[in-house]
Image: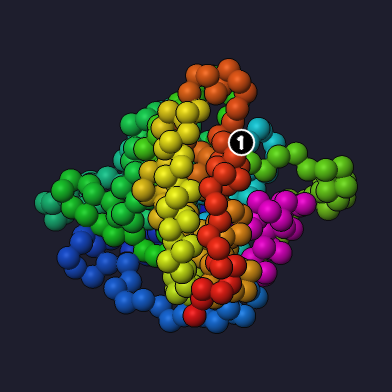
Amino acid sequence: MTSRIQSATPGEQQGEQATGQAPYPTAAGSVSGRQNGRASRASLDELHETARRIAANVERVLVGKPDVIRIALVTLLAEGHLLVEDVPGVGKTSLAKALARSIDCTVSRIQFTPDLLPSDVTGVSIYNRQTGGFEFRPGPVFANIVVGDEINRASPKTQSALLECMEEHQVTVDTSTYHLEEPFMVIATQNPIEMEGTYALPEAQRDRFTARVSIGYPDQQAELAMVDEHAGHNPLADLEPVSDRESVQRLIETVRSVHMSPEVRRYAVELVSATRQVPEIRLGASPRATLQLVRSARAQAALSGREFVVPDDLHSVAVPVLAHRMVLTTEAHAARRSATDVVRAILNRVPVPQGSAGTNHR
């Protein structure tokens, strides 16, 4: 199966080209694209080697940003979704495309625009004169990796079409439910400073994203290397897959098996609970955030070569996982306090469990 990036603009038909499969997915209750059984686990050595190849492949496109690439890999292995938010021209879409092309699976790209409709994302039922019935034409969301470019340019009505897809890995159209094939990941980009013609993501939508990253400007050395290597050609054009869907599914099973002691689990709950008690925060992190913090910490531990989670793993992913979910008070904005500052203050304030630095593992 070959990776494909394709645009989905309003009015385009998204049939077999968007999914890489038969144009009509089956409804729930019959045979679907989603696997009923779990894939076998990969060893930590295999996980580390595969992750290294993917990271090296992405770094050919996004030069000098290893921490950002690592969070993208953590999100992929944690079965989550990634929001890339930054100013124009720093490589948001390139990161999303490079990660998608590094895995040999079905890929689709949606260019979000103000006139995009929910059916342009999920699909639509079309009347077939020959059969005398309606047939479902799947939208670009029926892919393993969905790249949503400038997601905040679409209306809230269209943005909401992704809520069910991201949380339940399924699409409901005309009372019929269609399962999405695993793994399923949404990588969305948005520009935080260009407000004209954009719609801010509602809290429910932001909470669906496991992590948010900001790429930032490269340093001069990295930018010089980018000029030397990328000025003459587009590196995305030469990018080849270094893994496949089955391998990624095996890595995800390995991450699921990473051990987390009761003390570390309690520490994760305390960190999230603390966001609901800070005066600067009007809306704290949700229980969904707790689950995704735990999953991300397991992925971080596995990428570090460990079969167990330590508090440092929670610290490594806390800001990307928690900061974008919180709504600050007016006073916090006036004091120029950011959600990142608040999360870091919570990490410093909540006591780390004693004896959890590797002693409470199997």
Residue at 50% of width from left, 44% of height from top?
322
Visible in this render: residue 116? no
**Boundaries of the magenta span:** 51-71
Residue 39 image-quadrant placement: bottom left
Which residue is tagged 1?
341
Q: At which x and y percent is residue 323?
A: 53, 40
Of residue 283 and residue 358, the one placed in the foreground of this image is 358
The amino acid type found where label 1 is placed reads Asp
Determine if the magenta segment contains residue 62. Answer: yes
Q: Main secondary structure of the magenta part?
A: helix
Residue 266 image-quadrant placement: bottom left
Residue at 50% of width from left, 19% of height from top?
330
Visible in this render: residue 361? yes
| Direction from residue 303 to residue 143 in the image, left or right | left
Of residue 289 and residue 19, the one placed in the foreground of this image is 289
As displayed, is residue 85 above or below residue 133? above
Q: At which x and y percent is residue 245?
A: 48, 70
As displayed, is residue 94 above or below residue 70? above
Q: At which x and y percent is residue 118?
A: 33, 38
Residue at 53% of width from left, 48% of height from top?
350
As displayed, is residue 200 above or below residue 253? above
